[in-house]
Image (tube, helix red, strand yellow):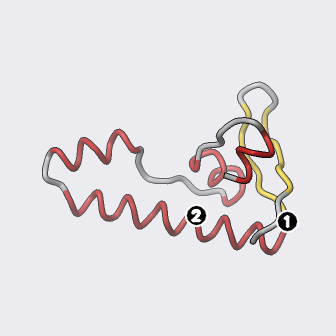
Amino acid sequence: YEMQKRLGHRVSLESAASETLGTKKGGSGIEAVRWFREGKVDKVIEYCKKDVEITKLLYEYIVDNGCIHYWDKYNGRMTCHLQAR
């Protein structure tokens, strides 16, 4: 939310994870809905756990570094300076 306020637009978790941590999410919200409808609840749980893990790691990165990186399709790799609460 703080990034969105500062930048004026939303940054995807995938973009921040990739540029800041060098990792990928392992799925998308659309895939999670499909897995749920197919009864693959275990995959949904793993997807959610991974998102929470990445969010925690990004928060820790902000605490340690005061910024987060993300990919902007027009400008490439960008940095947003933030303060953890």
Foreground of the two, 83 or 76:
83
Foreground of the two, 1 or 30:
1
Q: Is 34 left, or right, of 72 in this rendering?
A: left
Residue type beneath disc 1 = Gly
Residues at marks 1 and 2 touching, judged by CB atoms closer than 8 Å: no
For disc 1, the neighbor class at 10 Å (few under 14, some 14 to 19, many from 20) is some
The residue wearing badge 2 is 55
SS of the residue at dot 2? Answer: helix
Where is residue 46 shown, x and y percent of the image?
34, 64
Which residue is depicted at the point 49% across and 53% down?
25
| Image disc number at residue 75 | none
Badge count: 2
Which residue is depicted at the point 64% across and 51% down?
18
Where is residue 21 shown, x and y percent of the image?
67, 60
Q: Earlier in the sequence, mark 1 or mark 2?
A: 2
SS of the residue at dot 1? Answer: loop
Which residue is depicted at the point 30% across and 64% down?
45
Q: Is 25 left, or right, of 32 in this rendering?
A: right
The residue wearing badge 1 is 66
Vertical comparison of 64 with 45: above or below: below
Taking the view exactly as shown, the residue that stands out farthest to the left is: 39
Where is residue 39 shown, x and y percent of the image?
13, 52
Foreground of the two, 46 or 83:
83
Calculate the distance from the C-alpha at mark 1 to the C-alpha at mark 2.
15 Å
Which residue is depicted at the point 20% across and 59% down?
41
Quarter of the image with the C terminus is bottom right
